[in-house]
Image (cartoon, rainbow, N blue to C red):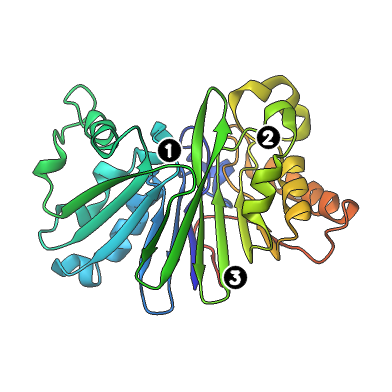
Amino acid sequence: MKVTFWGVRGCIPAPGPDTNRFGGNTPCVTITGDSGTLVVLDAGTGITVLGRELMSGPFGKGQGRATILLSHSHWDHIQGFPFFAPVYVPGNSLTIYGLGAASSRLEDILEGQMNPHFSPIQSLRNLGATIEVHEVSDGTRFAVDDLQVSTIELPHGETSIIAFRIEEHDTSVVYAPDVGYPNGQVLDRAVAFFDKADLLIHDTTYSSEDYEGRAGRGFSSFDQAATAAVRAQVRSLSSFHYDQDYDDATVADLLIRLRRRLDELGGQSITLVEAREGLTVEP
């Protein structure tokens, strides 16, 4: 199993010379199974970079197949989808799973961002690829070829997100962006879901100082991610969803502090993955 980061920024894209090291695209991560199965986690602007790369292979010939798992439908997690090149090639097949009151509701949300007031692309049905949309909720389980997927619903401000656990053989990856724990206390049920994951990709939007004034926005601090990782005894922790206002120097400093915090909590054995665009790791 390989994990590649295509977008690691939160809320809005943050391009520019001050964010080149970690990247300015919004969330998109891929998991590639040992047999080549492709799972895409979220469809922020990072998915456009992924799409250009995929076009050099089967997706450029209308022979591609992928599954997209959407943690939620805030724009920074879906705004790249209309510009994902493989969706315009007939023969490609995409299956989308995401949080919604019903599959039709999730499809309406994706369709809504293609409203002519917002986009020159006016319908999912105008796209060349075959697209299926499925709703998931707390505790949903399903298989994507040899990959086993399970879900948990976690709080995100006044709404919620779906975190995904993807397992292949003895390897597990948990994707938990945009998590905002009530009163800043990591939930026991979240720890149980993260338990002993080989890689936990966890929201690290804010420094502990900035979190104090922004707790109601539904994100985690670097310290809360460390707490979750240590309590769950994960093998490695990846930072993710950096605040759009943090430049590279700020993120780098926060990562030093995150490493220190892991060690202080007893997580010296936990590997810290410093997520940046283009990074590939094997959990």
The crowding category of the residue bearing disc 2, from other C-alpha atoms within 10 Å (few below 14, some 14 to 19, many at least 20), is many
Q: In the rendered structure, which disc, 3 or 2, sits on the residue that comes first in sequence? A: 2
The crowding category of the residue bearing disc 1, from other C-alpha atoms within 10 Å (few below 14, some 14 to 19, many at least 20), is many
Q: Indicate whether 73 appears above or below 92.
A: above
Q: Secondary structure at mark 2?
A: loop
Q: Which mark is residue 206?
A: 2
User: Which is in the foreground here, disc 3 or disc 2?
Assistant: 3
Type of amino acid under label 1: His
**Label 2 vs label 1: CA separation?**
20 Å
Type of amino acid under label 2: Tyr
In the rendered view, does 42 fall on the left or right side of 262?
Answer: left
Dots 1 and 3: beta carbons under 8 Å?
no
**Label 1 vs label 3: CA separation?**
24 Å
Residue at 62%, 57% in the rendered image: 200
Residue 70 position within the rendered picture, expressed as x and y whole percent measured from the top left = 40, 45
Q: Is residue 132 visible?
A: yes
Type of amino acid under label 3: Pro
Q: Which residue is mark 3?
A: 283
Residue at 60%, 41% in the rendered image: 242
Residue 102 position within the rendered picture, expressed as x and y whole percent measured from the top left = 30, 35
Q: Which residue is mark 1?
A: 72
User: Along the line of sight, which residue is nearer the eye, 32 or 58?
Assistant: 32
The crowding category of the residue bearing disc 3, from other C-alpha atoms within 10 Å (few below 14, some 14 to 19, many at least 20), is some
Residue at 32%, 58% in the rendered image: 67
User: Along the line of sight, which residue is nearer the eye, 69 or 89?
Assistant: 69
Q: In the rendered structure, which disc, 2 or 1, sits on the residue that comes first in sequence? A: 1
Q: Is residue 273 visible?
A: no
**Label 3 vs label 2: CA separation?**
25 Å
In the rendered view, does 280 fall on the left or right side of 271?
Answer: left
